[in-house]
Image (tube, helix red, strand yellow):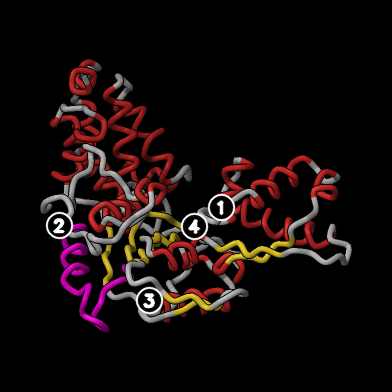
Amino acid sequence: MQEHGEYYLSPERPLTDAEKKLVWKKPLSHKVSEEERRICKEIKRNWNRGEMKIANILLEGDAGSGKTQLAKALSANFGLPYTKVTCFADMDKSDIIGAILPVVSSERLEKMEHLEQTALKALYDSDGFQSTTEILMNALGITREQAALKMKQLLKLAADHSDGEAVEYRFYPSEIVRAYQKGYLLEIQEPNVIRDAAVLMALNSALELDGSINLPTEIIRRHPDFIAVITTNRSYAGSRALNEALRDRVQHSEKMDLPTKEVMIERAMAKIGYQDEKVLSILADIIIVLDQTARTNAIKGVAGMRSFFYWADAVAEGASLKESLYHKVIYKITTDSEEIGLLEEALENHGLIARLEGVPGEVKKNEKATMMQ
């Protein structure tokens, strides 16, 4: 990759301390991919070319193929704060733009359940830097989908406790609006699971290069630095083909597959510190064959880089190569006996089971420990 800052899109733009913390810092284990180089060059080249600007990216591939890692790497390369939104089937327009919430009086607040009190106080005390989803996730220790549902419950609860009094209302922007307005790099995970066409239309409109979002309080324009990185899994349960209008708004796409065997080994060495290249070569070959076999036989599970890393890490700690193959890789793909049989047969036919069994029984644990010191 080029020198640090070479791909910064707005080098003179001042970031707040909070925003600087959102710019991803590449770990030492990060290895620059061809996809990363290609995207950075294309975006930088076209950044000031008006209608030819590239600011909506699609990364489509299997789970564990490095989509989110790449999205974060782009944040580091461009010098933009990174944030994300994980889509879910029942998203509505308030999840896209945000929500207006009545401010309940302190007297009425005290009469509520502790959980609702905690949630509402966290929202009322917020400085507008975080989205409602992030606020509720942090305050209640819940998932994004649970936070979205809790926000809808709070809207109704707060309205019920106003009792028709003159009430102050506050607008709480969504994570999408925050990134859109402030010029962040936003990863939009799995928009293809959204069921409501109106929600997709709102998202489509926002992704126009000269787009805008109609909020209840104002109309906001797309910040010139805003970049949307859409990440989708090809074989994700419950997903459907990416909406055509959404795909049409993308200016650059990458098909994310397993990297080459050499890159797999290099990344494993950097990530977990295990240096036995011969063993890693066998593990990588097995992952590649399992990935190909699962695709060929329409097995929905995935043998990806995550499985490779966790399997190699277990082996580095002295786990049985063959036993850990099942717990770290095969059972993640499927637990169906017939499908497991197909995967085992493929490994046998490629001579990989014999190669695995030919590895000396004791894999040195200190191989990793030495590297990590």
Measure the alpha-carbon separation of dots 4 and 1.
23 Å
**Tag 4, which secondary structure?**
strand
Name the residue carrying label 2: 6
In the figure, residue 55 lies in which quadrant? Answer: bottom left
What's the residue at 77%, 40% (across, down)? 114
In screen coordinates, is 180 left or right of 34? right
Q: Would you say the residues marked 4 and 2 are in contact, meaning their CB atoms lie under 8 Å apart?
A: no
Where is residue 89? Give x, y as percent: 57, 64
Q: Would you say the residues marked 4 and 3 are in contact, meaning their CB atoms lie under 8 Å apart?
A: no
**Numbered label attached to residue 127:** 1
Task: Nearest to the eye among marks 1 and 2: give it.
Answer: 1
Q: Residue furthest left?
A: 2
Q: Which residues are magenta?
A: 35-57
In screen coordinates, is 358 left or right of 330? left
* Dot placed on the residue nearer the N-terminal end, 4 or 1: 4
* Dot placed on the residue nearer the N-terminal end, 4 or 3: 4
Where is residue 223? Give x, y as percent: 38, 71
* Dot placed on the residue nearer the N-terminal end, 2 or 3: 2
**Numbered label attached to residue 86:** 4
**Numbered label attached to residue 247:** 3
Where is residue 189? Give x, y as percent: 44, 59
Q: Tag 4: residue type?
A: Thr
In this picture, is 55 found above or below 300? Answer: below
Front one among 91 and 232: 91
In this picture, is 42 found above or below 270? Answer: below
* Dot placed on the residue nearer the N-terminal end, 1 or 3: 1
Q: Tag 1: residue type?
A: Asp
In the figure, residue 311 lies in which quadrant? Answer: top left
Q: Would you say the residues marked 4 and 1 are in contact, meaning their CB atoms lie under 8 Å apart?
A: no
